[in-house]
Amino acid sequence: MKKILNNPQHYVDEMLDGLCLAHPQLQRQGDDGRVIVRTGGPVPGKVGIVTGGGSGHLPVFLGYVGEGLLDACAVGNVFAGPRMDDCMTAMRAADGGAGVLQLYGNYGGDRMNFDMAAEMLELEGMAVASVRVADDVASAPAEQRDKRRGVAGLVFVYKAAGAKAAAGASLAEVAALARKAADAVRSIGVALTPCVVPESGKASFEIADSEVEFGMGIHGEPGIWRGPLKSADALVDEMLDHVLPELQLARGDRVTLLVNSLGATPLEELYILYRRARQVLDERGIVIAHPLVGRYATSMEMAGASLSVMKLDDELAGLLAAPADCPFWSVR
Amino acid sequence: MKKILNNPQHYVDEMLDGLCLAHPQLQRQGDDGRVIVRTGGPVPGKVGIVTGGGSGHLPVFLGYVGEGLLDACAVGNVFAGPRMDDCMTAMRAADGGAGVLQLYGNYGGDRMNFDMAAEMLELEGMAVASVRVADDVASAPAEQRDKRRGVAGLVFVYKAAGAKAAAGASLAEVAALARKAADAVRSIGVALTPCVVPESGKASFEIADSEVEFGMGIHGEPGIWRGPLKSADALVDEMLDHVLPELQLARGDRVTLLVNSLGATPLEELYILYRRARQVLDERGIVIAHPLVGRYATSMEMAGASLSVMKLDDELAGLLAAPADCPFWSVR
């Protein structure tokens, strides 16, 4: 876990500089440059969608600012929530006059700052709605879904809500759709190695060479069990055993599936995981539409993978298939 | 460097299964299923482009089979060349009646098998041309370019040749263009950690926790020097010092640039590298067009990065901008 960087204190800002230089459709805004917006300003009459969160998870969060997706993102330090001021700047940048949806992963710090930003801007007359995604089934039991963390399933909710907003829906409609999408997605991850937070220079947790942590969170939050690394197929079977029951799937139902690397785990292994997930869903008569395999929500160089499954109805399936374009994901 | 897999002997085939299940525009062919082709067969009247090489480098090689790119790929075991039979199967699958270009990285085993396959199929009447990409400046001096290895710069040559073929050029024209593109691209890599070859279970090389190998090849071939890890900016400066001189760039010239992760190195670090490369090229008055930042040619979970620079004329710039679509790269 060596890192290629300059001054660790400049890690986030140099990353943002490089990102906007490589992708001129993205721009830095705000007094600290910690807001990423689409070049060209808000789309008049369209509901704006903003997100935010800590750095170190590319493409999450800021990488999904783009056509048919998000309008702005407030960016924190590595694994730390964005400032309230940056949440407000993002919301102003996203506001095309039809209101703004805050759409982000369920973490305490992010929630506090987005809630305060919403209060401030509602006083100024902005119409604001908030939807938090809490898809990590390993982080709390089903009865306490509001205590669950948001992980990679967020990406599907971005896509569905972004397409709904692009189609001209009202703020109430986009928020209702985002809530439906958030309710339909579940995720679980396994971690094989930690990553190093640049500012501290320390590994996010420790784990033996032969071990896996099943259900671990993307910042190294404890999972369900830790033990010897199992085969890819055995991991998938157990992950799906945790993810599928809450979705109450029947034969003939459609889902979308994301097989996501936490960073170091290569595409080759993701396809081995996808193969098994497809086998299991085939056996149950469940159809996969619009699958994703790749690095969509990471923890820098952490090794490990997550599975996210979203139950689809016709509306969600249509929204996932709608055109979208950001530096890390293109649908056409 | 833990791996998520089942039987290491099934690593490649299970990966190929998962890949084709996730991306139904790709299909396995050949008696061993080790040829990846575009669903729907060859495009009548279009020059076919085939490639091939060892597994463990996704998206290279097979991942670039797609619209405006390649027609077929022969797939070897991890870090091992494809069989001659599979090279022939790939060529037959790519042959739309206008001939076939073999376009691959310069490695001995690959060359031998592609050469034999070309001889066999020429006897059957197929028109065949061959272009090898040898872009790794660290692997041999400029006077011995035919001894250099092919690395990530191959991706730009795929794109340019693929667009030329899609535009209806003849085999001779596509081959000449591919040669021009191969002559215009230079690459160099730095490695921070090895990767583990599944079949052997062993690391591809050893390196200390504080060290970098400058100029190392993607299979762990020795580089130019090994020493303490430098800052991102210092690495970029030294990498460009090796890459730029042979391209004989003047103020106002255009290049394209790929900042590529060898696997574990995260996007955040790639953008820090891109930022510095952009600064250096800006200072020299050189314009970057169509840059790529991401994982385009990897060694599974190896940490490290490479830079590839291609000097552009109007034709190459136009071909890079032409529409293309494969599971890992979309241009529109």
Image (spheres, coloured by chain):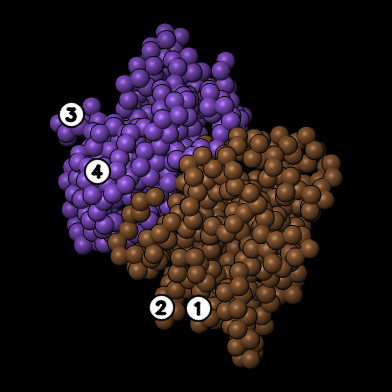
Chain colours: A purple, B brown
Residue type, numbered disc 1: Arg
Between the C-alphas of marks 2 and 4, the distance is: 35 Å
Q: Secondary structure at mark 3?
A: helix
User: What type is the residue that disc 3 sits on?
Assistant: Gln
Camera-nearest label, 3 or 2: 2
For marks 1 and 2, give the one nearer the viewer: 1
Tell me the CA gap for discs 3 and 4: 20 Å
Q: Are marks 3 and 4 in contact (CB under 8 Å)?
A: no
Q: Which residue is mark 1?
A: B83
Estimate the x, y position of residue A327 in percent, counting from the top left. Answer: 54, 42
Say what secondary structure mark 1 lies in.
loop
Task: Identify the residue position indicated by label 2 in the image.
Answer: B32
Amino acid marked by disc 2 = Asp
Looking at the image, can residue A160 be seen?
no
Name the chain letter of the residue that bears numbered label 4: A
Mark 1 is surrounded, within 10 Å at the Cα level, by few (under 14), some (14 to 19) or many (20 or more) other residues, namely many
Residue reaching furthest left?
A: A143
